[in-house]
Image (cartoon, rainbow, N blue to C red):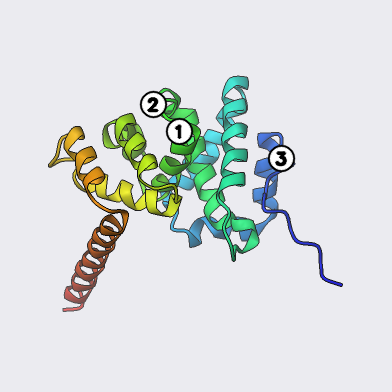
Amino acid sequence: MSKPRKPREAFKNVNSINRFIEIIKNNEDNLNCLIDNYFNGEMIETAIVSLNRIKSNSDKTKHFLKFMHYVDSKLNFAGQYNQNKRHKIPTIYAGAIYIDKFEKEFNEYTMEQKLLIAKYSIVEYLEFYKNINKIFSKKIMNCIVEKDKKWSYQTEFMTIAKKYEKTKTEDEIIEYIKSKEPEELLRESYSDFLELVKKIGELDESRRF
């Protein structure tokens, strides 16, 4: 007889921030998820402080729990491991920082866009969070989610938009994304990533001498 399948949601029955924090503290694997997923180490403490601050505000608590459950229900895919906590926990932590420190800016977006922004932010510093409306305007995010429904594609489109942040206007970025096929944008993002890896490798190599 086969074992019953684990539910896709990791936090389905979590209805308080204290319970969410308790689960994180009591499960070392969950904490390792943050490190394994390259969550900015300096921001982990910021996220924990934000969670404790949110608890004292009922409206922000409702916002956080709604966001947490949305992430938990959406960041699922075939072949997932450990209910996909590796992606979920860092994304929820980033969302907590936004809800605590930049809720007005965060509320510019739909819940779908909040998930994308939080997931994209996990490697960033606080200055990025602060300027999120400038980096990814509502119009740009609308364009990105309309371009393709796969969230893995959408985060790559965000990378393209960020690439041109300082060299193109908002309308030019939107037109550029609209004019390209999704696969073209993916290739461009991947090519830029390989170029970055190459530069990092060259830098590390130079430090040996």
Q: Which residue is mark 3?
A: 14
Residue 117 percent location from the top left of the image: 41, 41
Residue placed most toward the observer, 177 or 126: 177
Tell me the element at label 3.
loop
| Amino acid, disc 3 | Val
In the figure, residue 197 lies in which quadrant?
bottom left
Crowding at dot 1, Cα within 10 Å, few <14 / some 14-19 / many 20+, comes out as: many
Identity, as a three-letter code, of the amino acid under mark 1: Tyr
Instruction: Give the camera-side residue of 95 and 127.
Output: 95
Identify the disc placed on residue 98: 1
Q: Give amino acid for label 2.
A: Glu
| Residue 165 vs residue 145, the one in the foreground | 145
- Sequence order check: which comes first, mark 2 or mark 1? 1
The quarter of the picture where the N terminus appears is bottom right
Classify mark 2: residues with Cα within 10 Å, few (<14), some (14-19) or many (20+).
some
Q: CA distance from mark 1 to mark 3?
A: 20 Å
Residue drawn at point x = 54 percent, y = 40 percent: 48
